[in-house]
Image (cartoon, rainbow, N blue to C red):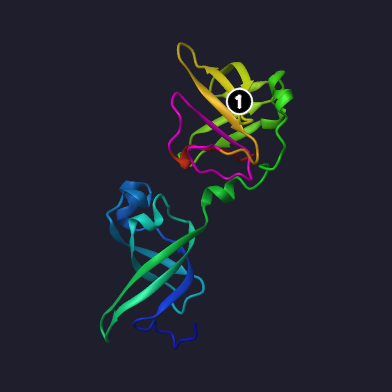
Amino acid sequence: MENDGRLKTGQLYRFTAELIRQSFWGEYNGNLQQLSSYYSVWVRASNAPITGIEIPIKKSLIKGWKEGMTATFTVKIAEDSEHFQYRFATDATLITTPTEEKHTENTTQEIDTQAILHGDYSSVAGTWRNELGHEIVFNKNGLVKGGQIYKSGIGSDGQIGFSVSTGPTGYGMSVYPIGITIKWIDSDLSKNRIIAGQTAPNSSEQVFYKID
């Protein structure tokens, strides 16, 4: 909407912004999910009449979002005076995340299920990483990092399941080709994905995407 450079009382403004780290984010590693119910977030607006704005916003609106993500905000000006302006975000929509940028390449490669079942892992070879920083590394012969596969099979939903040995213990791993849903958590269906662990993951941050 047209304006003279000052946000007006009672109006709603829609703009795109980048979340910027603040000093008190340090102990949370930039993860907004763990902060209080309402908190102020500095954002850098790319198409607003200002270069920066501090916005009180509900935790529930941006649960799990992190520094560096790009989002669109609807900001309402609730009170305005010569020396004070109160504003808050009524909604926010995530556009991109740093991890999405990292695993843009090599994610559309078709996974060769039959080759994998016969011991050729070329179609999943490379490094896979989740948002927690954990990595799984494959070469054409199997796992390079993360243990040794001793059993594999196809699940009822089309995913490829592995039993992995790490010495005296082990864990399960599943490869989800493009388009196959991981039923209990959100993930990007346009990309190949891996989940792994002794228990089922409970967060999208635990999903592995190929980064090289």
Check the image and report above or below for 105 versus 17: above
For this view, does 12 lie left or right of residue 113?
left
Q: Say which of 165 and 52 sits in front.
A: 165
> What residue appears at the point 45 percent right and 23 percent down from the top-left corner?
198
Instruction: Quadrant for the C terminus, please.
Output: top right
Residue 134, given in percent of the width and then of the height, sits at 49, 34
Q: Residue furthest front?
A: 156
Q: Amino acid at mark 1?
A: Gly
> What residue appears at the point 63 percent right and 48 percent down from the top-left corner?
104
Residue 188 belongs to the span the image colors magenta? yes
Instruction: Give the labeled residue for mark 1.
Output: 155
For this view, does 60 lie left or right of residue 211?
left
Q: Say which of 44 and 23 sits in front.
A: 44
Residue 162, given in percent of the width and then of the height, sits at 58, 21
Q: Quadrant of residue 192?
A: top right
* Majority secondary structure in the magenta region: loop
